[in-house]
Structure formats: structure tokens, C-alpha cells
Amino acid sequence: MNTTFQPLPVKERTFLPKEFTVTNWETLKPYYDELTEREIKSSSELATWLGNISELEAVISEDACWRQIKMTCDTTNKEIEEAFTFFCMEIEPKIKPYTFALNKKLLACPFVNELDPNMYFPYLRGVENAAQLYREENVTLQADLNLLAQQYGVISGAMSVEIDGKEYTLQQAAKFLQNPERDLRQSVFTKVAGRRLVDKDKLNELFDKLLSIRHQVARNAGFDNYRDYKFRELGRFDYTVEDCFDFHNAVKEHIVPLHAMLARNRQQRLGLDVMRPWDGDAEPKGTQPLHPFTSGKELAEKTVETFSRLSPFFSSCLTTMQGMERLDLESRKGKAPGGYNCPLAETGVPFIFMNAAGTMGDVITMMHEGGHAIHSFLSHPLPLTAFKEYPMEIAELASMSMELFSMEHWDVFFKDQTELHRAQLEEMERIISVLPWIATIDKFQHWLYTNPGHSVQQREEQWLAILDEFATGITDWSGFDEYRRNLWQKQLHLFEVPFYYIEYGIAQLGAIAMWRQYRGNKQQALQNYQNALSLGYTKTLKELYATAGIRFDFSPAYIKELSDFVTPILKEMGVK
């Protein structure tokens, strides 16, 4: 098996000194001044100027990413937090006015029309959009929002529970919810719910601050509400608010019944008259929870092997990341929750962060983040940093498709066929169950930001109404009403990256379409996948999906078509 990978060639700097590092604004300012003042007298000089901007952006981006990576790896280290805060408050706000000036300079340049529209169209569209949205008074507010959003990780990262005399993070405790012993599951669920409620008011207070500032940002930019502002800021040029509502309705009509079918199937397997919140991930007595690995090192090694069966290139990317120590996989106290792949713009080799605790969910997360990593490697050769800043609808297609592509090779983790079958069914359950949750979170966000100034009580009531709309009605939540009213607080996207969530739903549908393509012709599907990801954001979303061999479509008719594809597969897996 060939898992070697030639280190990515780091593009030689031509604008910044080779030894330059980001320390403070004073050292960066001369380069921004030079770019702002430089006279551009030809199309070749425009290309050089854009290349210089790209180089500067890559260096700054990689520095900022490392500050955030280090802080999420250790939320208790004040020095690391101060370095991140310094960037947010003392460097980034000073960059934004220059970015605005450079964007205006580009749009006014007489040679801009000579740039190849086949590659530059999405970029120039984004530059024009950013220039239209920019408001000087929002610079400080955005810095405040960045700092406030990080507090969610600090609050959540400090949450832990004691089980059998041992302390566990909430991510680590989640594995007990797969245990066949129902009393243990109930005990753990109750402890986790209780621990989350301890910080309920603190998180509501934080969220109210975020809502208020976000609304002010929108008003400053001339929008009635933050929802409409954020759609523009996210560059959602290929779909509308109404399309999102169609997605919500289609999920309710075509996916919730599949979710209910899976929930009833688990209820039958467990032999329960009534399903409770701690039963959703459990297996019957006598069936041990899946235990695919015991350490982060083993998870990484088995992922490399799994990827190698799809493509030697895929596995070599992860091998490179291992060699450069760009994997932090295991959960520990003081580490921020969640998981991510962070592209690093100058070196091109990304960083994967997660909170592995030995569960099947961790395997899925690793496949997911591994797909993001492949995307980072494939798009890195593109000439401009901006070309690699692709929207989440294609980024998540990369990660979610990798989950499904890799599924047939999970015998690397499970030698026993029965366990392999369970793992594959668990993935299907997760895919189906996440779509109603995505619709719930997205519809909730639409309400949150089109109803500014609402009270905590109104928020809770609206949350419950939307949650019930996409629920199967099979699980009995009695005794946990307060926890259920605040269940939205566990979704970090609401705090840290508002409106970034329906992208998962759009991409999940796309991933199912990619899987359908893969089951018909594996090599063609993998080639289409790589072709699309290699384009970064040099094409529109519809063009990127077409290159991948699928449609950018989340209409009710298309969701029904994909639901009809999945239904017989579930039945083959024994779901009735």
C-alpha cells in the first residue's frame, strides 16, 4: 500500500520576507499601504497585485488559524487566549478597512474585465458583495462578536460529569448512552442534562448579547434583520430564503417518516413499550456498544487504511498530516467541544481537531473531517487564496460524501460482520435523523433573527413549537421538559457561526446523490468528486455540483427522489 506523500510545495514568497511572521499591526501596515497605493498599469501588473494580496492573506490567515486551533485545544491557557484576543481586537479590525479599500481598488481597475471569467466570476462577485456590505462602524462590532462567540467554547469546555467516580467531558459521557444497561443510560443522561442546565442562564445571557450585536450589524448595513444580512454576507447567490422553507417542508414530508421508521425499528430491537431520551442510541442487552478503536493514534491509523482502499492519494494526505502533527483527536478536560478541519492557507496541510472517546460517532466524525482535509489538499494548488475560500455547501459535500464512500470499508474498524452491519446502519440512522434536526435549527434561526428583541420565554416557546414540528413523537420526554426547552443550547453553530447549518442539509442531500452515483460507478464517482473539489470556488455552486455529477437541488421533488433511493437500502438492512 502506497501511503507516502510528497510534502506540498510551499509557494515561495515574493511579496513578504521569507522570515516574516505576524506579531502586531505595525509590522503589517506597510504592506497594506503599499498594496493600496500601488499604481496598476496593465493586466499583468493586476495579476501580480492580486498574487501579492493572496500571499499576504495566506500568511495572516494561517497565523489566525493557529491562534484559534491552540485555544480550542486548551481553553484553560490564558496566554493562548490572550494571543487569540489580541488578533481579534488589535489586528483584524485594522485589516478590514484596508480589505474594503483593496476591494474598491480592484473593482475600479480598468483591467479587471481582462480577468478570465471562467475562473474569476465567483471571486469578483464576492468582492463586489463584500464592498457593498462593508460598514466602518461594524468593524468593532464584528470583533466583539468573535470574542463573545468564543465564550461558548469556554463555557461548554468546562462542562463535565462524574460517572462511577471518574470525571468525563460531556462528549466522553455520550458513549454511555450506547450502553445496553438502561439504568446506566438514564443516570448518565440525567447527569448530562442537569449539568447543561447549570449554565442555562449563562448561555441565554451570552446569546442575548450576540443577538443584539448581530441585529445592530444588520441595521448598520441597511438591512431590516440579521437573517437577510447574513444571507448576503454568506454569499448565498444560488438559493433563497424561500428555498430554505421548501427544504423545511420537504424534510417534514419525506424524511421525518423515514426517521420514525428507524426509531420504531430501534424500539423493537430494544423490546421497549416506551422510548425515552436515553434510548435513542442504545443497543439491546447482550449487545455491547461498538468499540472501533481505543486511542487517537489507532483512530488515525485505521482511517489511513480505510482511505487507502478508496484512493492512495486520500490516505497519503492523512499520512502527511500525521507526520506534521496536525491531528488532535482525543477528548480531554479543558478542550473545546466539537470537531473541525481547519485549512491552513500558506502551508496547505490542514489541521483536524475532534473529541474522540472511542465511539462509532467518532469514526464518522473522522471520515467527515478527513473529507474536508482532502478538499483542502485538492484545492491548495489554486493560484489565489480567495479561490480556496469555498462555501459550505460544497465543503460539506466533500465531508459527507466521504462518510458514505468509506462505509463499505469499515471492516478496518470491525472484523465481525455483525458489528460492521451495525456500524453501517448507525450511519444511515445518523444521516436520516440529522436532516430533521437541521431543518429544526435552520427554521429556528429564521425566527430568531426576524424577531429581534424577543424574550427568553418567547424563544423557548418558539423552539418547542419548531422542535415538535420535526419530531417523530415516539420518544417520551416527560420529566425533562426544562432540558428539552433549552436543547438548542447544545448547538454550537447558533452561538459561533449563525446561519451556518442548512449547508449541512443541502450537502447531506448531495452526499446521498454522490453515494447513489458511487454505487453505480465507483471510479467515475470518485473522479467526479476530485474534479469538483479541485475547483475550489472558481465556479458557482450549481457548476460545482454538476462537475461532481449531481444536481444542486433541494426541492420537495428531489428530496422525495433521494428518499425513494434510501428506503429500499434501509429495508435491506432489516429496517421495517
Image (cartoon, helix red, strand yellow):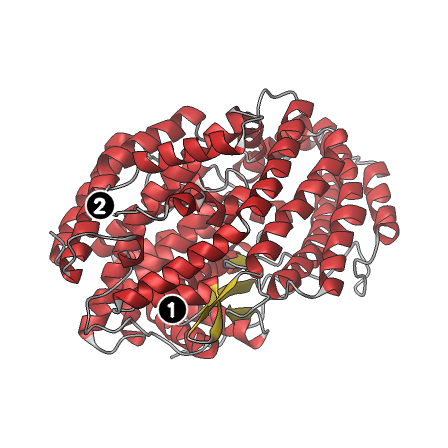
Q: Position of residue 249 (x, y in %)?
A: 30, 30
Figure check: 67 above or below 495: below
The amino acid marked with disc number 2 is Ile
Say the numbered circle drawn on residue 474: 2
- Residue sitting at 75 percent across and 46 percent down? 92
Instruction: Return the x and y of residue 524 as percentages of the image width and height.
Output: 30, 55
User: At numbered mark 1, what does the secondary structure look like: helix, strand or loop?
Assistant: helix
Name which of mark 1 and mark 2 comes first in the sequence. Answer: 1
Crowd tier of the residue under label 2, counting other residues whose Cα lies within 10 Å: few below 14, some 14–19, many 20 or above:
some
- Give above or below for 575 relative to 282: above
* Foreground residue among 195 and 74: 195
* In the image, farthest residue toward the front: 479
Can residue 293 be spotted in the picture? yes
The disc at residue 307 is 1
Task: Say if 253 sits above or below 567 in the image.
Answer: above
The x and y percentages for residue 36 are 82, 38
Instruction: Name the disc covering residue 440, or none.
Output: none
Is residue 80 toward the left or the right of residue 230 in the image? right
Kind of residue at badge 1: Phe
Q: Residues within 10 Å of mark 1 (few under 14, many from 20)?
A: many
- Please tell me whether mark 1 or mark 2 is closer to you in this view: 2
C-alpha separation, residue under disc 1 versus residue under disc 2 = 37 Å
For label 2, the SS is loop
Can residue 537 be seen from the camera position used here?
no
Where does the N terminus fall, quadrant-wise?
A: bottom left
Residue 541 at x, y = what percent? 45, 38
Depth order, front residue of 92/459: 459
Left or right of 413 on screen, residue 270 = left
Residue placed most toward the observer, 188 or 346 = 188
Q: Residue at x 43, y 77 (%)?
A: 301
- Quadrant of residue 73 in the image? bottom right
Q: Residue at x 86, y 37 (%)?
A: 37
